[in-house]
Image (cartoon, helix red, strand yellow):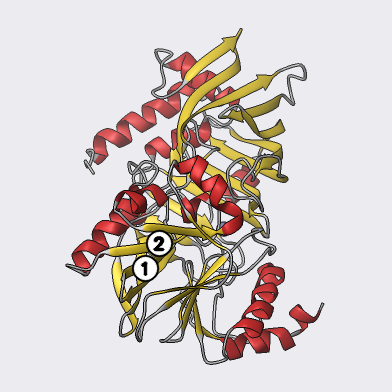
Amino acid sequence: MVRKNRATLLAANCLLVLAFSTHADETTEFCLDGAFDLGARYQGLRPKAGEFYPTSWCVITEGDTGRVMFSGSGKSNPDMDGDWTVAYLPPDLVRIVNRTSPDVEFHGAEIDDEIARIRRMDPRQLAAEIESGDGNIEGLEVTRTGDRIARVSASADMPLRGQVDVDWLWDWAEPDTPSLKIVVDDEEFFRGTGRWRMLDSIEAAAIWERTAGEAPVEVDGDRWPSVINMRLIELEDGVYLVRGVRTGFQHLVVDTSKGLVAGDAPAGWVEFHHLPPADLVPGLGNDGLSRRFIEFLGETFPGRRIHAVALTHAHDDHSGGATAFADSGALVFAPAELTGFFDDAFDIQTIPVKEDTIIGSGDNRVRLMPMGPGPHADSMLGVWAVDKGWFFVSDVHVPNSDTAVPRANRAITECWFAAWAVANLPEDVRVVNSHSAPQTPVSRLADYLASEACSK
Ligand SMILES: [Zn+2]
């Protein structure tokens, strides 16, 4: 990555801010309240459009400093309510505002482009930016009616879909509460209504304060927004986790008699509230993350070929890199209900897993296990290093700690998985997952089932 000169950036940023703030000292909040189609983004229960969930996106813009705060609430998955707030404080500080736990601060991050992309969510800010410049914004085609934004066209590189058109269509029949449709790849992704609010000076000053209490967790700025930092963790002879495939992603690799078997083909993640939409792992395209994962395996296990990858479910961040594995010569296994969808999406032939399927022979076999429909997705696979006692799942078990009760905000899914695991796995098997570090013995999942959260 090319490092720009900070002083130049800072100066350019200040000019930009002064130039397109209509009132330089005002702090304005713009919110979009509506519904987002997780199905169209391939994060729903089934990989098809039409699964809308309530969603709000808000951006607070401060005129004279260029500070911006984004808050989102809604679902990132069918079973995961979420709300998150990120403050961007030029020149180079990003703060994840946690409110009930210490904030996380990234110092020295390159945030100018991201600030601009988020601010454009507010159509008045976008109009002002166009007024103040030469009318061109890279990656955007903007149509105006008078001084109002009517349409913004861009494109995005989506796992499982490739390059798609993205259109923001504004309707100003109610000028103070304009309505918006975001259409992606000819499907409605988001529909909602905008509203503005001015913050008074006391509220405006307070929002940029750190969460009171414990000091923030400090992180180096080049880890924002996501970083690839792969390293091998040996769980047992021949059974590994590759940690840091990207921030918050780790994947099982088992060295079987047939070759390496991996759990999941990870892909990037497009942020659709950005204009233009941006990938969280920039510059890697659709299956670039899985290509890097495959390269890492090649360097780490010289001479061992990748025999297969098992796609645990249809969500794009777990399966979007399948073509990289297919191109490397690996077999691609998937839940039987999803092979038609994957074969169309990727133009490859996936192997349906209808029932428990063994890969390899000898003392380090893998058993792929269909888990049936659950609250996270209608079809799931688990990957069991059956001779060594390790089991890998994605997204249905993501504990924060080693406690004997499930996470409160994901109890339905955690209890569902605990019941499945207790019914299907020996109690000394340890469960690892794609997003968190704890290793959970099945006996602890039995404790989950006895907890109040799982008896409801
Ligand atoms: Zn998922």
Q: Crowding near pointer 1: few (<14 within 10 Å), some, many (20+)?
A: many
> Residue 252's image quarter?
bottom left
Q: Specify whether 289 is left or right of 402.
A: left
Is residue 71 shown above or below 101?
above
Give me the disc on residue 309: 2
Type of the residue with mark 1: Val
Give the number of marks. 2
The numbered mark, 1 or 2, whose residue comes first in the sequence reads 1
Is residue 14 shown above or below 106?
above
Residue 228 appears in the figure: yes
User: Is the residue marked 2 within 8 Å of ligand 1, measured from its CB?
Assistant: no
Q: Specify whether 397 is left or right of 192.
A: left
Whether residues under marks 1 and 2 lie with C-beta atoms below 8 angstroms apart, the answer is: yes
The residue drawn where x is 36% and y is 51% is 326
Residue placed most toward the observer, 325 or 245: 325
Type of the residue with mark 2: Val
Residue placed most toward the observer, 48 or 335: 335
Residue placed most toward the observer, 348 or 450: 348
Give me the disc on residue 261: 1
